[in-house]
Amino acid sequence: MTPRTPSSGSDPQQTAENRSEQETAAKQTVPRQATAKKTAARKTAAQAAARTPAQKAVAKKAAAGRADAETTAAKRAAAERPAKTAAEAAEKAPAKKATTAQTAAKQAAAKKPAARKTTAKRTTAKKATAEKALAKKTAAKTTDGTATVKAPASKAAEKRAPVKKTPARKAPAKKVVQEVPAGKVPVEKAAVRKAVAERAPAKKTPAAVPPVVPAPTPALDAADRERLLSGTHHDPHSVLGAHPVPGGVAFRAFRPYARSVTVLCGELRAELHDDGQGFFSALLPLQEVPEGYRLEVAYEETVIETEDAYRFLPTLGELDLYLIGEGRHEQLWTALGAHPMTHQGVTGTRFTVWAPNARGVRLAGTFNFWDGTGFPMRSLGSSGVWELFVPGIGEGELYKFEITRPDGSRTLRADPMARRTEIPPNTSSVIHASAYEWGDAEWLARRAERPAHEAPLSVYEVHLPSWRPGLTYRQLAEQLPAYVKDMGFTHVELMPIAEHPFGGSWGYQVTGFYAPTARLGTPDDFKYLVDALHQAGIGVLMDWVPAHFPRDDWALAEFDGRPLYEHPDPRRSAHPDWGTLEFDFGRREVRNFLVANAVYWCEEFHIDGLRVDAVASMLYLDYSREPGQWVPNEHGGRENLDAVAFLQEMNATVYRRAPGVVTIAEESTAWDGVTRATHHKGPSGFGGLGFGLKWNMGWMHDSLQYMSKDPVHRRHHHHEMTFSMVYAYSENYVLPISHDEVVHGKRSLVSKMPGDWWQQRANHRAYLGFMWAHPGKQLLFMGQEFAQGAEWSEAHGPDWWLLDPAYGAEADHRGVRDLVRDLNTVYRATPALWERDVHPDGFQWIVADAADDNVLAFLRLDAEGTPLLSVSNFSPVVRQDYRLGVPDDIPAWHEVLNTDAARYGGSDVTRPDPVKPEPQGWHGRPASIRLTLPPLATVWLRPA
C-alpha cells in the first residue's frame, strides 16, 4: 500500500515568509480599519442620541457608578497585555464583562458632558471597551434584528494593533454592525438593567484576567491547500467545515469558482474571507459549532444555499469497515457505492469506494459539472475505503471517482459498486434507489421445497437484447413469460445481464458487476421482468462471470493506479484467450467483492440460480498457457488454490443465504467434485467446489459429433452416444445445447444434421427426444426450439419470421416447436425423467451395443420404480418388429411421444395401440416387446 502523506491538519507554526506577508497585509488594512472605526463611532453616537430620556437616565446612573472601575481596568489591560491583538482580547474576555462594557459604551456616548470631564486616557479606554462590546454583540442571538458579520480579513489584520502599538486593536471587530430597528426600546432598557446588575459583584472583587491563547489563523496553511488542490488530501474533513479553535469557531470552505461564501445559521450571516484559489475562511467568536449551519455560495450568475458537506460525521460504522477489511461483508453493496439516504437529519447521497493505493479520491458528476476539485473524499483509516456524504443530491445524478494514482497522475473511474449505469457507450455511474415492490412471495416460499437436482429442470437460454430486438425489460415482461410458459420450460437462463461496454461480447466482459445493463431499462424494470416470470411459474437463472474483466481504462483495470482487482503478477492476471484480466482470487477484498456480488443478484433481484461462466479457466494456472507462461502453486501443482477457495466460499455463502437457489458450473474438464459438498474431500484431497449442477460439456461434444455424421457412418461412432453414461453419476449434470454451439461457424442445431431438409429436421427432432430422456437436466438456446437454420446473431436475434403463416415452410418449423412443447409437457409430468437424475438406480440400459442398427434403448425410473422406455433409431430406415427386452411386471406399454408424428413434420410411423410384452427373454430381460421403429426418430413408452 502507498504510505500516507503527513498529517493533513492545520499547522499553527508560521514561516518568516508567511509573517512578512501578513505584516504587509496588516499595513494595507490600516486605512480600511480607520474608516470602519469612524463609521461605527458615528453610528453609535446616533443610536445613543435616539434614546429616550428614561434610557439616558439609567445610562447616566450606570456610567457614574462604573467610571472609576472602567478606568482602572483599562489601565491594567494596557499595562499587562500591550502586545495582544484586538481580536484576541475580544475572544478571551468574559461574557459578563463584554455585556457590561457594551452598556457602558452606550452610556458614555449618551452623556457627552461627563465624557468631556474625564482625561484623554480614560476616553481612550472607554472607546476601546465600546469597540469590544460591539464585537461581542454579534455573537449574541437577539430578537432586535439580524446580526450581519463581516469576517476578519486574515491573521495579518488581527496582528495590526501589536505592530503599530496603538489602542485601535478592534479594527476587524468594528466591521460588526448591529442594527436596532425602531420600537425596540423596552428590550434595550432591560439589557441595561441586566448589565448594571451583573457588574455589581465585579466592583467588590475584580476578576482575575485569564491568560489569552493566541488565536490561530482561520486560513489553511500552504501544505493543506496544496493537497486539496492536487487531490491528494486524505482527510479534508479535518480542515474544511467548522472546527472549534481557541478564540471561537473556524469556518473553512473550498469552493472553486465561487465569488463569495457566507455562513448562515438562524439570524447569523457571516461572509467568509476569500483566501484565493477557491478557499474561504473566517474565525467567528462563537463558543461552539452552530448546529445545522448552511452555506450561501455566490457564483458569477447564481447564488445557491446548501449544506456544508464537510460538517458531517462518517456514514460508515466500525462494523462495516471491519467486515470490509476482513473480506467478509456479505452485503457489500449496502456499504460501498452511491446510496441516497438521510444522514444527521439531512437528505443526500453517500459515496464510498475502495481504493487503498490512491493518494486521493475526489467525486465528479453532473452535480459539480464533472469538476471534482471541490469534492475531495476522506480516507477511513486503514480500510482503503474513501467516503463523502454530499447533501442535496439524489437519484438519477451521474458520477465517477477521480482518483489520484501513486505516481500523481489522475484517472476518472466508474463506480465498481454502481447499481445503475448510463446506456453504453456512455460509461458513467448513476445514483439509484430502488422503489420496486415484489409480488413473487408465493414463488419464493415454494422454490426451496425440492432441490434442483431432484426436480424437473428444463431451461430456455435467452439473450435478452436480441430475443425480441428493441424491447425493454418491461415490454419483455409482457411477452417472454407467456412464451416460455406456453413452451413448457421450467426456467429461463439469461445470458449475462450485468453491464458490459461491448454488445458483441454478449455480456461476458463485464464492467458493472452490480448493475443490470441499462440497454433495456432501469434496475427496477429488470426486477419487474423477474417478478413477471416468477408469477408465471418460471424460474430465472442468470449467467455470472467472475473469472475475468476487460481492460477498459475507466473500469476495474489498475483501478487506483496499481493492480487491485487483478493479480499483480502478469502471468496470473492476463487471460491469453480473451485479452482480459483475471481476478486476484487470493486477495480477500476482491474475493469479498465477488462473493457479495453473487449474493446481491439472488437477494436484490430474486434470481433463482447462477450459471458460473468459464470455471475451468479459473481452476487451472496453466489454462491456455504454454510452459514458462505460468507459475506453479505452492505445492508445485497447476491448480489455482485461490480460485478453489473462492468458489467454495461463494457456493457456501449463496446456499446459506438464499434457500432454493442453485449454482451451475460451466466446467469443461474432469475436475473432481465440482458438485460435491465443500466439506467432503475427494481423492484429490480437495473438498468439493459446492456447485449444485454442472454443464455436461463432454456429452454435448460427443453427441453432436455423432449426430453430425451421415447415418451410414454412425456405426463407427456409436460409443460417442453411450460414453456419457460411464461418468453420468460422477456429478449432477445439465445437458446443454447453448449459444456457444450455434455461433462462429458452428452452424445452428438443425444445420449440423446431415441429409436433406426432411432428414435434417428428423435428426433434429430425434436428438431432442434422446436428450430429454437422457439423465440430466436440459438446456436449449433460443431459436433451436423451432429449428432455425441460420446461426444466431446478437444483431437480429432468432428468425421469428420462420413461424409466420405466410412463409411456405412455416409448418416445418412450427412442427419442431410443437415437439419441444410436448417434450416439456411429458417431461414435467413424468418423475422417472427427472426424480432420479443423479442416482444410478434411475437408469437401466436395454440395448447399448446395437451400433449396426444405430439404435439406443434404455429405461428411466422414478423413486417408486415406475419406468419410462426411450428408444432412438438414428438411421433413416424403418425397422419392423424390432425386439427389445423389457421387465415382465409391466402388462402393457403405451406410446406417449413419437418424434416422427405427422404433426411434428414426421412420416407418422406411430403406434396408437398399447403393446403387450411377450414371455420371450431378450437383452437379458425375462420378457420382450416388438416395435416398429420409425426412421430418424425417438419414441417414449410408459406402462399402459
Image: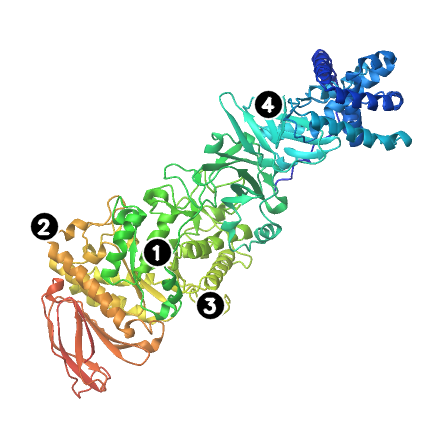
- Give the residue number, with chain letter if any, for mark 4: 277
Q: Distance between the residues labelled 4 and 2?
A: 73 Å
Helix or strand or loop: what does disc 3 sit on? Answer: loop
- Give the residue number, with chain letter if any, for mark 2: 806
Viewer-closest of 608 and 127: 127
Viewer-closest of 656 and 395: 395
Q: What residue type is labelled 2?
A: Ala
Where on the picture, by quarter, is residue 458?
bottom left
Q: Earlier in the sequence, mark 3 or mark 2?
A: 3
Q: Nearer the viewer, mark 1 or mark 3?
A: 1
705 displayed left or right of 695: left
Q: Nearer the viewer, mark 4 or mark 3?
A: 4
- Give the residue number, with chain letter if any, for mark 1: 531
The 10 Å Cα crowd at callout 2, few under 14, some 14 to 19, many 20 or more, is few
Question: Which quadrant of the rendered structure holds the C terminus?
Answer: bottom left
Q: What residue type is labelled 3?
A: Ala
Q: Which of marks 1 and 4 is in front?
A: 1
Q: Earlier in the sequence, mark 1 or mark 2?
A: 1
Q: Residue at x 81, y 20 (%)?
A: 60
**Can you give x and y, in whole percent of width and height, for residue 543 in the image?**
37, 54
Q: Nearer the viewer, mark 3 or mark 2?
A: 2
**Can you give x and y, in whole percent of width and height, for residue 608 in the image?**
38, 60
- Give the residue number, with chain letter if any, for mark 3: 677
**Can you give x and y, in whole percent of width and height, for residue 788 in the image?**
19, 53
Q: Which amino acid does label 4 sit on?
A: Gln
Q: Distance between the residues labelled 3 and 2?
A: 53 Å
Helix or strand or loop: what does disc 1 sit on? Answer: helix
